[in-house]
Image (tube, helix red, strand yellow):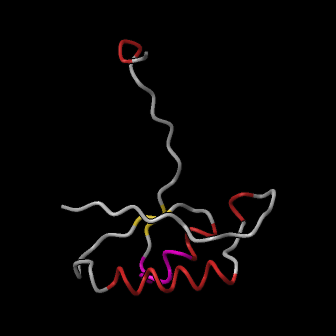
């Protein structure tokens, strides 16, 4: 199994972080990167994306089927903390 991490493309500035959309340049870069990835990924890949608008827009260039992963807080046991 391979894990590929793909950060969202360039996004607009804004105070509502989840609502920030891709810029025109970001859309162009996402489209190009999706084309590059598409020929290299297996046909049965799974795509996970955050609920942020820019992440959903970036992922949409690669696949119409996107699973939204909600933020989760990970707590480490006390004995594991530094």
Magenta region, residue range: 58-65
Q: Residue furthest left?
A: 1
Q: Is residue 77 left or right of residue 68?
A: left
Q: How many marks?
A: 0
Q: Is residue 79 left or right of residue 61?
A: left
**Quadrant housing residue 36:** bottom left
Could you say which is closer to the camera, residue 5 or residue 51?
Answer: 5
Q: Residue furthest top?
A: 79
Which residue does the image show at 42% across and 17% down from the upper left?
81
Residue 46 picture location, percent across and down:
31, 69
Chief SS of the magenta region? loop
**Quadrant housing residue 80:** top left
Asked if the stretch drawn in magenta spans residue 64, the answer is: yes
Residue 70 picture location, percent across and down:
51, 53
Up/down of 63 relative to 15, above or below: below
Quadrant showing the N terminus: bottom left
Q: Is residue 52 left or right of residue 69?
A: right
Which residue does the image show at 27% across and 73% down from the upper left?
45
Asked if the stretch drawn in magenta spans residue 16, the answer is: no
Q: Is residue 11 left or right of residue 47?
A: right
Q: Residue furthest right?
A: 15
Residue 2 picture location, percent across and down:
23, 62
Could you say which is closer to the camera, residue 71 or residue 7?
Answer: 7
Which residue does the image show at 68% across and 60% down from the upper left?
18
**Quadrant housing residue 42:** bottom left
Up/down of 70 relative to 63, above or below: above
Which residue does the image show at 43% across and 15% down from the upper left?
82
Residue 17 picture location, percent across and down:
72, 57
């Amino acid at each position: 199994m391979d894990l590929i991490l793909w950060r969202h493309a360039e996004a607009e500035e804004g105070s509502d972080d989840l609502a920030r959309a891709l810029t025109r340049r970001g859309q162009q870069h996402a489209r190009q990167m999706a084309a590059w990835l598409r020929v290299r990924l297996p046909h049965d890949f799974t795509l996970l994306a955050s609920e942020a608008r820019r992440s959903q827009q970036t992922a949409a260039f690669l696949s119409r089927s996107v699973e939204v992963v909600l933020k989760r807080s990970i707590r480490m046991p006390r004995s594991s903390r530094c």
